[in-house]
Structures are given as C-alpha cells and as structure tokens.
Image (spheres, grey):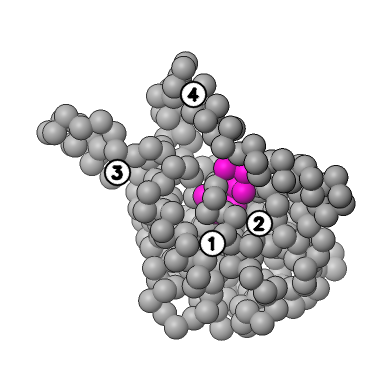
Amino acid sequence: MLPVYVINLDRRPDRWAVMSAQLARLGIEATRIPAVDARLLAAQEEWEQTTNGNPPFWRINLGAAAGMLSTSKAMIELLGSDAPAALILEDDAELATDTPTLLDGVDWWPAGVHIVRLESGGDKARPLRRPSGRTPTGRMLLRLERWNSGAAAYLIDRRGARIALSAFADPHTTTDHTLFDLRYSKTARKFGTVQIVPAMARQRVEDGTDQQQWRDKREMELRGWARQRYRLKRNLGSLPYKTRVMALRAFGQVRDRPVLYRETPDG
C-alpha cells in the first residue's frame, strides 16, 4: 500500500478535521505533514533585513516558499520509506470514491511516468495526448503537454521526488508551476506526467487560501519595468516548448480537453 501524506498547518486544525473525516470514509490511512508557516518565514526575512541589511532572500512569494518547503517535507518522508511512490495531498483536496484503488501499487503506471496527477483543471481545455493507460477503475491516463494549475493531489515516485527536491533547492516559481507547467519549467518536462481524466480530486474552493496575502505582497513588489522584464524573460524562454506543442496539435498528437472532476468513475 502506497503511503499518503497530507500537508496541513498547525493553525488550521479545522482543515485537518475535515480531511481526516474524508479519508476515514474512504478507508485511507494518512500521515499528517506539519506545513511550514509563511508567517515564520516573514519574521525570519524581517530579521535578516534588520540585522544584516540583506534583501529578501526568496525569489518567490513567502506563501509559495512555505508551500514548497512543506511539499519537500512530504517528499523527504517518501524517500525515507521503502515505498515506490506516495500520494501527496493538500488539506483542501476533495477526493473521488475510487481513490483507494490507486494505492495498491504502481503496476498500472505507464512506462517513464514519475507523476500521476489526480486534480481537475476546471472547464478550461488543456493540451493532452491520447490515452496511454488507465487507472484500476478505468479512468484514462493522458500525458500532460502544457500546464494544469494546482498541486492539491498527485502521486509521485521516488525518482520524481528526487527531481523535484533538486528543483526546490533553488526555486524560481511556485510548486505547481515547477511540477506541472511544461511551458516554463524544465523540471516539469522530466516527469512524464499523466493526468487522470475524469479527474479524481478537486480543491474545496469554499475553504479559500492562506496564500493570498503573500501573492498580493509579491504583486506589489513586481511592479512596472521589473514585472515586464520578468514576463518577457519567461515568455522568451518558453517559445521553443510552445512551438513544439503547436506542432503536436497540428499533427493531431495533442487534443485540448477539459479536465473535470467526477466523484465516481462511472458517474
């Protein structure tokens, strides 16, 4: 049985209670990973600037940095075990009824795949390849070819965890962009990620997010020419990959599909 790790802040026992109840209904045992609190990073950053005169040492917003450190803790737990892979969840993930069937092993994973993504992408269509396999309950596995936001629910194997941790050591963008945005992240292109369709997880939007204040703060910092320079550099770097996806689409190798959540495989 593959381990399940749930990332949860100490100051959000409400979310842990909801998540624990859901997992109990599904018959899934999970390990809680105490999340890194961005407030502590903010205090450390302020101390560094006050005592040493150093500029902020995160290139990403503090909420994203805390999320990445928290995810790193879960991946380190996987590598410290003898399991071939693990399911990593954020504490606002809503899971399909057949999620337990994914945890029996990795025999159903397509060759060369290091991440299996459970989370939906909403109504917006995503570039996906033809099916390369199926989950134990028959949901399609389609290779992700561009981008799908969010990192609330995914399976990752040991090789994938090592790749991710190497990228997290010198972060340039958020966790979900690092893992799943093939346009801008060279790391994302190493995972051979497949998306489950229909999706088996979605985020509970009514819970909101603890990261909004940190995103807003970074938006204020990246104003004017600094913001435009950042976007230009990122877009120029992504052109070769975007061209590749356009060619795949033109030759019928990629189709744009919505990745919608479905609670049951036949619902």
Q: Residue at x 62, y 43 (%)?
A: 183
Q: Quadrant of residue 156?
A: bottom right
Q: Badge 4: how crowded within 10 Å, few (<14), some, or many (20+)?
A: few
Quarter of the image for the N terminus: give it.
bottom right
Front one among 109 and 6: 109
Q: Badge 3: how crowded within 10 Å, few (<14), some, or many (20+)?
A: some
Q: Earlier in the sequence, mark 2 or mark 4?
A: 2
Taking the image as shown, residue 74 lies to the left or right of residue 46, namely: right
**Residue 229 numbered mark, or none:** 4
Q: Identify residue type, mark 1.
A: Leu
Q: Earlier in the sequence, mark 2 or mark 1?
A: 1
Disc 2 from disc 3: Cα separation:
28 Å
Q: Quadrant of residue 57?
A: top left
Front one among 154 and 111: 111
Taking the image as shown, residue 33 lies to the left or right of residue 199, namely: left
**Residue 119 numbered mark, or none:** 2
- Give the tally of numbered discs: 4
Q: Residue at x 71, y 70 (%)?
A: 97
- Magenta stretch containing residue 181, yes or no? yes
Residue 136, image x and y in percent? 74, 78
Q: Is residue 120 above or below residue 32?
A: above
Q: Which residues are magenta?
A: 178-184
Residue that mark 1 sits on? 89
Of labels 4 and 1, the one closer to you:
4
Disc 2 from disc 4: Cα separation:
32 Å
Taking the image as shown, residue 157 lies to the left or right of residue 226, namely: right
Front one among 247 and 66: 247
Q: Secondary structure at mark 4?
A: helix
- Magenta stretch containing residue 106, yes or no? no
Q: Secondary structure at mark 1?
A: strand
Q: Identify residue type, mark 3.
A: Leu
